[in-house]
Image (cartoon, grey):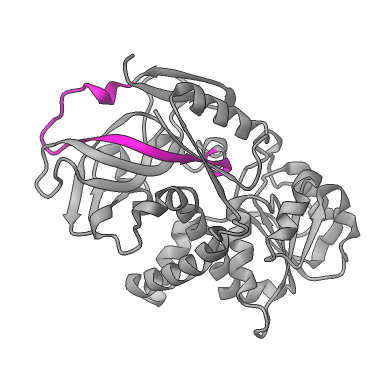
């Protein structure tokens, strides 16, 4: 069977199929490398990439020749199988942003000890964070035995760290409570974990999670939320409490109810994810503040200016190592890794994620 690549119809995410992977056999031009994608994580975060593919330009990273279709980006590991670039050797392993495919062709630039950036013309206007590929042999945070956890949690946790940092940097907009929807999602509970590390310090907010009844027990058991509430119990929360809403779900009905309930006591509305991709909607006509889309690279840029890249990296690494302890605890881990291979496994997990049928404690690591 020829190598395959997974594509979806833009705006119609249930329409998904496999096509031949051109990157498997296309002749390399000077300055290009071919990598075989060994393993990648597929989570609700990738559904968010697809849901916001147009507005956030996620479709632009790996263009699709099929009209009206796109390739969903994923985080994973790949090995160099062919190289025409000095400093990028066949057999080296890299971590980064890939399509759901067996192969990818990249154009390395800024090659150094830590890795390289993809300098393909179509990616030059896209944010550098997503264009960087880390050389595993030189990455101090890399552990072969933790590849699954790195692929599943590391990019999400970086976003979690930056959300927490952004809110604290703005004194939580004067709020005493942070309310997170889709609280069982990995980005949400990573954010809640970071917020929970502030407990006992001046101005530390109360952390409240919104989730489905089916995921309530798991979410409450994490220990990083002060309270977990079902979606149908939003009005049970005290409406007079100054609150920040961190919207991981993207659900327009949930957002409307949160805004209506808190009204002017909603001090900030932060739009992050789209786990409820089939309920997405705009922010017009809402009570309280207009929702503002959170863009992690903007906070990275700010902290590069405030602290410098090295210090930001040190802080993220320290928080990541602290987060890994409960996430991988042998007695009661937050995450259980399930592996799968082949087109059937990829499509099954994708459709489970679309339908909200995956268990929150399960993390899928796949390959084609």
Vertical comparison of 118 with 354: above or below: below
Vertical comparison of 348 with 19: above or below: below
| Side (left or right) of 161 relative to 297 | right
Residue 51 appears in view: yes
Q: Position of residue 274 (x, y in %)?
A: 62, 43
Along the line of sight, the residue nearer the viewer: 342 or 87: 342
Vertical comparison of 156 with 324: above or below: above
Query: Could you tell me which residue is drawn at 34 percent across and 43 percent down?
Result: 77
Furthest residue toward front: 331
The answer to which quarter of the image holds residue 242 is bottom right
> Is residue 26 covered in magenta?
yes
Q: Which residues are magenta?
A: 21-46
Residue 162 appears in view: no
> Is residue 210 covered in magenta?
no
Furthest residue toward right: 236
Q: Position of residue 146 (x, y in %)?
A: 41, 54
The answer to which quarter of the image holds residue 102 is top left
Q: Position of residue 55 (x, y in %)?
A: 52, 40
| Side (left or right) of 88 relative to 342 | left
| Side (left or right) of 164 relative to 227 | left
Q: Position of residue 334 (x, y in %)?
A: 61, 55
Query: Could you tell me which residue is drawn at 48 percent across and 59 percent down?
Result: 158
């Amino acid at each position: 069977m020829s190598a395959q690549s997974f594509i979806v119809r833009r705006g119609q995410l249930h329409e998904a199929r496999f096509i031949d992977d051109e990157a498997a056999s296309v002749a390399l031009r000077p300055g290009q490398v071919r990598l075989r994608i060994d393993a990648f994580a597929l989570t609700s975060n990738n559904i968010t990439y697809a849901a916001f593919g147009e507005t956030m330009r996620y479709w632009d990273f790996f263009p699709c020749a099929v009209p009206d279709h796109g390739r969903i980006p994923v985080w994973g590991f790949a090995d160099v199988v062919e190289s025409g670039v000095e400093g990028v050797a066949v057999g080296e392993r890299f971590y980064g942003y890939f399509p759901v495919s067996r192969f990818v062709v990249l154009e390395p630039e800024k090659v150094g000890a830590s890795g390289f950036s993809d300098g393909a013309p179509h990616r030059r206007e896209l944010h550098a964070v997503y264009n960087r590929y880390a050389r595993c042999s030189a990455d101090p945070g890399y552990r072969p035995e933790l590849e699954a956890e790195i692929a599943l949690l590391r990019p999400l946790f970086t976003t979690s760290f930056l959300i927490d940092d952004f809110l604290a940097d703005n004194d939580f907009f004067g709020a005493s409570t942070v309310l997170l929807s889709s609280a069982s999602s990995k980005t949400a509970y990573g954010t809640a974990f970071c917020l929970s590390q502030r407990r006992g310090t001046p101005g530390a907010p109360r952390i409240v999670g919104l989730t489905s009844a089916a995921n309530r027990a798991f979410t409450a058991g994490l220990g990083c939320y002060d309270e977990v509430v079902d979606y149908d119990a939003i009005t049970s929360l005290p409406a007079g409490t100054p609150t920040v809403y961190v919207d991981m779900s993207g659900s327009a009905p949930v957002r409307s109810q949160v805004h209506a309930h808190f009204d002017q006591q909603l001090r900030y509305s932060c739009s992050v994810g789209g786990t409820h991709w089939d309920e997405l909607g705009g922010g017009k006509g809402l009570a309280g503040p207009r929702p503002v889309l959170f863009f992690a690279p903007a906070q990275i840029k700010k902290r590069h200016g405030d602290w410098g890249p090295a210090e930001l990296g040190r802080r993220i690494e320290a928080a990541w190592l602290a987060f890994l302890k409960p996430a991988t605890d042998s007695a009661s881990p937050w995450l259980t890794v399930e592996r799968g291979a082949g087109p059937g496994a990829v499509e099954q997990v994708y459709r489970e994620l679309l339908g909200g049928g995956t268990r929150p404690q399960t993390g899928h690591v796949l390959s084609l």
